[in-house]
Amino acid sequence: MGKYFGTDGIRGVVGEKLDARLAYRVGRAAAGMLAGGEKKTEVLIARDTRISGDMLEAALTAGLCSGGANVGQLGVLPTPAVAYLTKKSGFAMGIVISASHNPYEYNGIKMFGGDGFKLSDAQEARIEELIDTDVEPVNNADLGRVGRDSGYFTMDYIQFLASKSQERFSGKVAIDCANGAASMTARSLFTGLGFECEIISDSPDGMNINDNCGSTHLENLRSLVKSGGFDVGFAFDGDADRCLVVDELGNVMDGDMLLAVFARGMKDFGMLRGGGVVGTVVSNSGMDVFVQKCGFEFHRADVGDRHVLETMLETGCNLGGESSGHMIFLDDMTTGDGQLTAVKFLNVLAESGKTVSDLVGEIPRFPQVMPSYKLSGGAQERDAIMAHPRLLEEVKKHQELLKGEGRVLIRPSGTEAVIRVLVEAKTERRAAEIAEDFIDLMKSL
């Protein structure tokens, strides 16, 4: 991680790590990195529904224009929409103002290159260098201009998603938009496809994004699916690049289970490239058992969709995902897209003729817990804990004790000030006990 960029762009509590001054410098730095071509640089910007989005959008836009870049403001749109539209329409960069699944107090800045992929480490490092540099101002005649989408780009993205619906699903669908960016697209998409659906948490007020809703708070969706007789429920996060699924019984399918379902289906139809799929180090160990049974490989990347993508490109795989619900269908999209995931899952359901619970019933699961230890001392405390001999010794000891029956993984979050503890064991109770011991240990260090 760099000075400003983490595993998923720049992110922090607004007014603390991230404010209008930094956003302006980021915009100016991005324009500086892109400058030098024969044509004026063109950049797209979108945001999620957080109250701070307007302020940060204005500051970013000012910074870009002051560096000579033209800006197309898309308003509220999902993160993957920006990746798709940037590549399709030939823009030099796409920027999303969002903190994904975090509470409204947070916000962030994610950047995509003209190819629709997130910026490389080298590009982020160059922007960081320029953020802290006094960039020469452009001449007044070379200042950038601002254009605003009248709805054309939004409809282009919705039509793209609709084109991926191949099988007519006839059941009832419930959708939770997390009061986030999907609130602007989901109703048009899913009702336009003719599905019988009920959409909840699609009334954002700037502060209710991810607030007891969406992919991090599934209680309301689970209750709705069970009580309303729905066949399936989908939950997105704040910027709609994640999707989790609730089956007809109200049980949750995480990203590992989704990845298994898609991998099996794509292999059966000869669409799985690279001889396998890509998950992460926190993917449930049941995935290893599942892919071995199905006859393909399972590659583990570091946590973060950019790391998943890197491993996909290295291995030639066209399918990858995270437990959190990021699914990357590389033949269709350069980044995770929650609504695309939902559309493709409905295709699988219609093709299989099974219920969701039957569809995932054959996928093995190891009991797993993943609590977090909240840091109060920042990077210094994080690094001290992660390198502490007692912690390293306990991890090694438990790895031996659990050999063949589970595992322990301790890792710092790349988006929040926490250290996550993942434990798999024979029973969930045993896993929870071990995890609690590690939390207590970190408190004492």
Image (tube, rainbow, N blue to C red):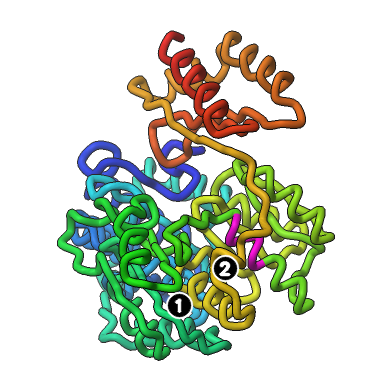
Dot 2: what SS? loop
Residue 219's x, y, as percent? 33, 53
From this view, report whether residue 16 is shown above or below residue 71: above
Q: Is residue 269 visible?
A: yes
* Left/right of residue 61 with respect to residue 128 in the rendered view: left
Between residue 279 and residue 370, name the one nearer to us. 370
Q: CA distance from mark 1 to mark 2?
A: 11 Å
Residue 439's x, y, as percent? 46, 20
Please state the extent of the stretch shown in magenta in the rendering.
257-262
Which residue is identified by label 2? 334
Residue 306's x, y, as percent? 57, 53
* Left/right of residue 11 with respect to residue 246 in the rendered view: left
Residue 237's x, y, as percent? 37, 58
What amino acid is at disc 2?
Answer: Thr
Which residue is identified by label 1? 85
Q: Quadrant of residue 330?
A: bottom right
Q: Is residue 138 visible?
A: no
Q: Name the residue located 23 percent from the left edge and 45 percent from the top edge.
A: 105
Q: Name the residue located 34 percent from the left edge and 45 percent from the top edge.
A: 134
Dot 1: what SS? helix
Q: Name the residue located 57 percent from the left edge and 14 percent from the top edge.
A: 391
Between residue 329 and residue 40, name the one nearer to us. 329
From this view, report whether residue 300 is shown above or below residue 224: above
What amino acid is at disc 1?
Answer: Leu
User: Would residue 391 be counted in the magenta stretch?
Assistant: no
Disc on the earlier residue, 1 or 2: 1
